[in-house]
Amino acid sequence: MQTRQLGNSDLKITPLGVGAWAIGGGGLQFSWGPQDDADSVAAIHAALDRGINWIDTAAVYGLGHSEEVVGRALQGRSNKPYIFTKCTLVWDPNDPKKEVTRTMKRESIRKECENSLRRMGIDVIDLYQIHWPDPDPEIEEGWAAVAELQKEGKVRWIGVSNFKPAQMDRARAIAPITSLQPPYSILSPDVEAEILPYCAQHNIGVIVYSPMKSGLLTGAMTRQRIQEMPEDDFRQRTVNFKEPLLTRNLNLVERMREIGNRHGRTPGEVALAWVLRRPEVTGAIVGLRSAKQVDGVIGAGDFRLTESEIEEIAKFLRENTPAQ
């Protein structure tokens, strides 16, 4: 796979990166249900062996467990990937409910960074990101804190996630932003209007999350699979996994399957190629829970849709989206 430079950094990343949200395991408000750690490690190794060169995780995924699994996957690897993680969602390990709170206080971020380094067994984080711009009044303090960590060499580059342009303006007044991580997919194209042009204007790299809409656009999702999801899988409670949108979305996947079949590609690779068609998008995060899943996405790194195929998808959505 060809690599792309991430914003103002020296990081040359592949168009696809390993997303480590689901490997945090189950039992939490925003989890994907139970997950076998050995499968997670095998998935990461398979992705790295196929050429993917970065992993994106966060301290809050599995309340530290995702970072621990990433650290385990890194052990003994000669081809070490770039490691991206996030801060500002915290929890009290002594709280039996493990409720997550949001803070961008300097001392909290510094403590989070040390904990992330320890869990993953690394000396420096390649990209450290503020997970959410919340609480909004603390943006300046939080961004100054991660910029301080960068100067100290704890992190190499700093980015934001889920920020709006006005919030990025406030951060940029303190220190340059290397990257933004927004949601972006065929079913969630909102960033095209303002956010992607803003990032292009200010040389901010874009690594998008949920490009396959949490597995819905992979081609492997069915009504039965959704019905059988464990109670702690957050996806069954989201609008795109429920009617009236579910029927439209599953029919869209079949149209994507037809497009993919013309090129020997999966619906998931079509979904990834759709987000990667935008020049502002540096890379797409791909959640992997098993080594086998790598086969269904890896081809997207070099696959491009034609203009007529992009219009075919747009036309389907125009004609099949239920009225609000």
Image (tube, rainbow, N blue to C red):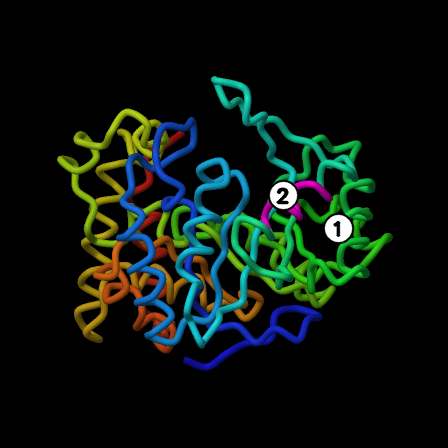
Quarter of the picture containing the C terminus is: top left
Q: Residue at x 55, y 55 (%)?
A: 192
Q: Nearer the viewer, residue 311 or 91?
A: 91
Q: Residues within 10 Å of mark 2 (few under 14, many from 20)?
A: many
Tell whether position 111 is magenta. yes
Pointer 1: what residue?
146
Quarter-wise, where is residue 31 in the image?
top left
Q: Nearer the viewer, residue 79 or 219?
A: 79
Quarter of the picture containing the N terminus is: bottom left
Q: Is residue 233 above or below residue 147?
A: above
Q: Is residue 153 above or below residue 131?
A: below
Q: Residue at x 26, y 53 (%)?
A: 39
Q: Whole-percent x and y of residue 144?
A: 82, 48
Task: Say left or right for 53 vs 36.
Answer: right
Quarter-wise, where is residue 103 in the image?
top right
Q: Which residues are magenta?
A: 110-116
Q: Residue at x 64, y 30 (%)?
A: 102
Tell me the CA gap for discs 2 and 1. Answer: 9 Å
Q: Earlier in the sequence, mark 2 or mark 1?
A: 2
Q: Whole-percent x and y of residue 71?
A: 47, 56
Q: Residue at x 37, y 78 (%)?
A: 302
Give the residue at the far top of this rendering. Answer: 96
Pointer 2: what residue?
87
Q: Whole-percent x and y of residue 160?
A: 66, 50
Please state which amino acid type lies under the numbered disc 1.
Answer: Val
Q: Could you tell me which secondary element the residue under label 1 belongs to?
A: helix
Please state which amino acid type lies under the numbered disc 2.
Answer: Cys
Chief secondary structure of the magenta span?
helix
Q: Whole-percent x and y of residue 167?
A: 74, 44
